[in-house]
Image (spheres, helix red, strand yellow):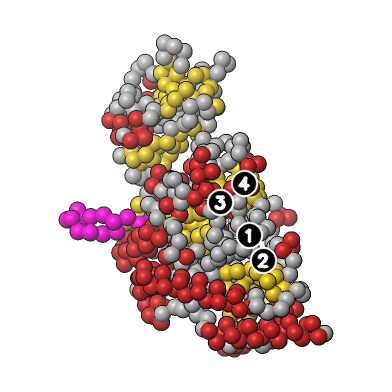
Amino acid sequence: MSNIPSDLKYTRSHEWLRHEDDGTITVGITDHAQDALGDLVFVETPEAGAEVKAGEACAVVESVKAASDVYSPVDGEVITGNEELATQPELLNNDPYGEGWIMRISPAAEAETSALLDAKAYEETLED
Amino acid sequence: MPFIPHTEDDIREMLDAIGVGEIEQLFDEIPADLKVESLAGVPPALGEMEIQRLMRERAALDEGQLNFIGAGAYEHHIPAAVWEITTRGEFYSAYTPYQAEASQGTLQLIYEYQSMMAALTGLDVSNASLYDGASAMAEAALMAVRANRGSKSARILVPTTVNPAYRRVARSIAGNQGLKFETVPYCPDSGVTLPAALAEWDDADVTALVIQQPNFFGGYEDVAALTDWAHARGALVIAVVNPVSLALLTPPGEWGESGADIACGEGQPLGVPLSSGGPYFGFLCCRQPLVRQMPGRIVGRTVDLDGRAGFTLTLQAREQHIRRSKATSNICTNQGLMVTAATIHMSLLGANGLARVAAACVRNTAELAGQLESLEGVQRVFSGPFFHESVLRLDCPVEPVLEALARRGILGGYDLSRDYPELGNALLVCATETRTASDIESYFQALSDVLRQSRVA
């Protein structure tokens, strides 16, 4: 059973996001996603300053099995990618909701978050 | 492995399963006006006996000509062992088997090929081959755009001294993918790209600079200065190189302060015979940090569960069977058989043998150009040293001269007037290690006669 913290929001494409106190959003991929991908060998994080749109591919996670896109959950601007992942992609396997975060985004003023799932709704998508 | 195509019944069953009446319906989404109903200009089929005869007659037309044409494909001596070994049953397949690791011999060969190409170019990694030099340059440009994330322009600077066919192919392949190819002029005196010619882009966002060494005219670009100019502006450097020349010249990995980022080119000079446009093969090498943007396959050396050495495809995660339309390229191993020949060719020649081939080419072309420019009405166009090609200007149109030479059994060179009209009656000549002193003498005599007659007429 994968770990799905109740204080986070989720997407159907297996990203999580956390609203930080300073108004920014931290994004990563879920425990379920990292488990399905297997051992990660490379993470390509977005450049600071990149404009992202909700549902748009903005990072790539590459495991021994596959390379998959990571989609931005909201419109906004990338503040930073997690540079630690460049040399330690395994952080994402070991701690997907903590040290394995992928990027921080400053959401656009009108950023739409109502379509995001809570932990329970996300858990239900995994059961389908 | 049995190779049994689907029977009518198999096909019917599959169509029924997905509720489709005819195979044609699967292609309904292609607009009717884009479908080609028949191929124009393709003659009716011939039987084996007839086609053999036709091919023998065509081949006879190529016999007995002394070849002084280069321009991207070069006649080199190929040791008999190269194709004897290449065409053994164990190698004689143009493709990596789908169950790649079952073919350890094929994988080891590709691994050895990659190791040799990395050593020749002075770079860290090589892929398992591309179609040809021109498509390799296009792939290198696409790769540079993916890899250079600091650049937003997708602007690729391409000097006019890069093979004109490569420039056209790169535009065809990548021009519709948002890449902007911009042309850098050459110096009319030296026939090379002066760093000053790049001043126009001093403050521009440039994604990559292409540098061909030796360039299409046979001359030597100031690769160090050009490389450093590009790197100072955050642009990547794509080297287009002749693998034989690398036995003598500074490898791309050592150009300038930090070396070229990507090297590519035509592999034909390494054991592949001249043939009307191919099959040849392209090569592509790069620095380690760019490896994930490199198109094609890579073979790695590893150990199995029992610690025994073995070979395996590696970094496959971005290939088309996994990433589909988002793969770095649709390129796989492509020219496996040509690469087999090249690997055997390189291992038979060795580093010293390849260097001797390169040195003989330089000597012969210097001798050829020196003799020809002593003729009245012939002069070298550019100052400066050259590798195994040189540009000569005649005092009359090139095409009739080449036709007259061909009637005397001499393929006299490549007519530059179509690609470089500004050079006038310019002819690109080449003499590889296969041309003897008497071959060069024959060319000298024939050209002397042809030019004299053209003056009389």
Mark 2 belongs to which subunit? B
- The image quadrant that residue B85 belongs to is bottom left
Can marks 1 and 3 be said to lie on one chain? Answer: yes
Residue occupied by mark 2? B381
Q: Quadrant of the C terminus of chain B?
A: bottom right
Q: Mark 2 falls on what kind of element?
A: loop
Total number of numbered discs in the rendering: 4
Mark 1 belongs to which subunit? B
Question: For the point 60% across and 51% down, which residue is it?
Answer: B194
Residue B306 on the magenta span: yes
Q: In the displayed image of the protein, which residue is found farthest to the left?
A: B306
User: What kind of residue is marked 4?
Assistant: Ala
| Disc on res. B269 | none
Give whichever of discs 1 and 3 has the lower sequence position: 1
Can marks 1 and 4 be said to lie on one chain? Answer: yes
Q: Residues within 10 Å of mark 2 (few under 14, many from 20)?
A: many
Q: Is residue B285 above or below residue A58?
A: below
Q: Mark 3 falls on what kind of element?
A: strand
Mark 3 belongs to which subunit? B
Residue occupied by mark 3? B210
User: What kind of residue is marked 1?
Assistant: Gly
| Disc on res. B196 | 4
Whether the residues at callouts 2 and 1 have beta carbons within 8 Å, the answer is yes
Can marks 2 and 4 be said to lie on one chain? Answer: yes
| Disc on res. B191 | 1
Mark 4 belongs to which subunit? B
Magenta-highlighted residues: B297-311
Query: Cα distance, mark 3 to mark 2?
Result: 24 Å
Whether the residues at callouts 1 and 3 have beta carbons within 8 Å, the answer is no
Horizontal and vertical percent position of residue B413: 64, 75
Horizontal and vertical percent position of residue B151: 55, 37
